[in-house]
Image (cartoon, rainbow, N blue to C red):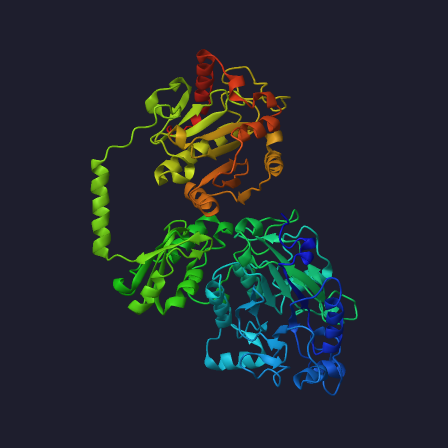
Amino acid sequence: SRAPDSPDAMSDPNAVKILIAGDVRGNLASLYKRVEAVNASSAGPFAALFCVGRFFGSAAAAAGEEEDGADATPTASDPNADIRAYVDGTLTAPLPTYFIDGLPHGREFCRHPEGVVAPNITFLRRAKVYEIHGLRVAALPGRHNPLAHDDESQLAATTAERLGEYRAADVRALRQSNASTGIDPGGVVDLLLTSEWPRGCDAFAATAPGHAVASAAAAGSPVVADVARDTQPRYHACGAGDTAGGDTAGGCHYAREPYKNPRGHATRLVALASVGNDRKERWLHALALLPASRQPPSALQQLPPDTTRSPYDARGGANGGSTDAAGGDAANFAGVRWEEPRAKRARVASQVRTEPLKGDPDKTVYVRNLAFRADEGALAEFFAQCGEIVDLRLGRDAESGRSRGFCHVAYSTAEAAEKALALHETTFYGRDIVVQMAKTEEERNADRDRRREEKRGRPPPPPPGGCWFCLSNEKDTHLVASIATESFIAMDKGGVVPDHCQVVPVEHTPSFAALSPSAADEIWRYLGAVRACLRAGGGGAPVPENAASPLDTVGVPGERGGPRELVAFERHLALRSKGGNHMHLNCVPVPANRARKARKIFEQAAKRLGFEWEGVEAPESALDLQTAIASHCGDGEYYAVHLPDGTVLLRKIGRGEPHWMSFGREVLGHLLGCPERTSWQNCMETEEKETERANAFKASFEAFDIMQG
């Protein structure tokens, strides 16, 4: 099937064809002349025309003062002479036309409360998500004034509306509208329209932008960047705004490579120059869009090969991590990954709310199965559709600040709580949420006591009789090299290299994500200890620094070799027919000169198999990794690769989706230059040899063993 928005989508009869124009500035004659020609061409007909940037001309520009670097509008006496013929009915717009930036210069034409200016010409004057020809179109009308943006006074609101400036309240309204509008509330936005460029939109672009683009991106609006990050549109169209100047007079055209959003689909940013600009910069863009509401998620998540990282994910917002644009007092945890660890812990601990929830229990709902990226602001906007919220509490980990996937919402009326119950099994941020009435503290305590009693009286289930990893089955215990309280290290039976080992929990637990906090932390410490041992030249089979093969060991007991790095992988498959998977983390030593290629070779292997990795920047703790796995993979099957620099590559394995059982060994066999050892059956040894390997690793690892400290 054809990927969405591919070049031949223009011929798709189900696609909605639209045109997007840059700043018009009163120049409707040039605009509609070109639009009529394109509409009559083989690419047409088109359903609508959207105009970003200033729509009306100003007297200053018409007089030759070139306000904001714009080109001169129709006449010096009347900069909006072109539009009067459409207002009085002399002419009719060739396409339904929608614009987002009409004030202050078009005040005389923009008095209608619904934005009607003339037949077929409409001002999208409210910050909200509109449904236009089946498309979800998000509009942020106007421009950013940092001095007045956060002023909540009535005077500021009146002044901002008169001058065509959006405020924090408008941004909140847009976000709430996105969560509640139309047939697909909270669904994917097809098109975001803004007058200004988003600040920093050129970050992580594969192609270095020219000076004009770099200047416009640096001068863009931080609020628009935050809105683009939060709404995650498929397309974002913007005009010259008021940021262009100098060699960017009249704006410039910029079509950025698509970037990937947290929801899995790509966004394409298109910035357009002013209509009829002298430098012949592109100002009209044709687009054919099949509405997201008519497509399965798998179709939307087909990413073009040139897709990049999002330009807005490096600082928790293009304004340096601030969420003031969203309003409210919700803590912003989006940027903590880039903070110094101690500062992060102190900051997060101070922001996690611990005081009792306000409101009455009989007016409070409990919500679970929340996506981990849904924060307080998104939840407030979504549940505010039911009524006035007295308090909202998102469950967060006290140390990391990460969401625990549930929240309580207290309403001012019982009727609002009843409406919230109707949202049960509604899709929110990609998950079907569970909404039920909250329990009183007495009920919660009683439930907790009952569960404790049941747990005390219930014997633990016996491990599957055939599980090789369960110590209770006493299989190949001679391979065990270290035992801690809740986990142990054992040599791999037929390792890729002689000191290939595995970190395994004592309990029969299916995955790292499902481990108890204490077991996960212990395995995390084991992982760090193995890494430190290898970097110090240790391991059961140390390799000389310039060895031609990773199998060329030093050969002298107790002697250290060259530093090596650790590549680890975990394959979580349900294996229900075999009693369920027993989590084990394969730890394979890789010489430093080969370790640099680890990420590249895993990415190449993924490409050959038709999937892409989700990269997780080096987690600081076991909880960080468990949270990342839950966020990317839910509670389903997955594959995880720990790279030498601490980065973790994740792949969610969908239900019924095949996965190569020996994938990790195959890739590492090629990385290490010993593809003949990718099958463990080919590497089998006698029990005596296996015992020698375990003892050699044990002796080398002793100084690093977490049980020695």
Q: Position of residue 371 (x, y in %)?
A: 43, 52
Where 401 sits versus 684, above or below?
Answer: below
Q: Is residue 213 left or right of residue 514?
A: right
Q: Is residue 258 left or right of residue 483?
A: right
Mark yes or no: residue 440 visible.
Answer: yes
Where 89 sits versus 617, above or below?
Answer: below
Where 452 sits versus 671, above or below?
Answer: below
Mark yes or no: residue 319 visible.
Answer: no
Q: Which of the two residues, 467 or 253, is positioned nearer the viewer here?
A: 467
Q: Position of residue 424 (x, y in %)?
A: 37, 57
Q: Could you tell me which residue is drawn at 47 percent across and 25 percent down?
A: 501
Q: Quadrant of residue 146?
A: bottom right
Q: Quadrant of residue 112?
A: bottom right
Q: Position of residue 258 (x, y in %)?
A: 63, 53
Q: Which of the two residues, 307 or 250, is positioned nearer the viewer here?
A: 307
Q: How many marks?
A: 0
Q: Position of residue 207 (x, y in %)?
A: 70, 52
Residue at the limit of the structure toward the bottom, as seen here: 77
Q: Which of the two residues, 675 or 502, is positioned nearer the viewer here?
A: 675
Question: The C terminus appears in which quarter of the rendering?
Answer: top left
Q: Is residue 48 left or right of residue 578?
A: right
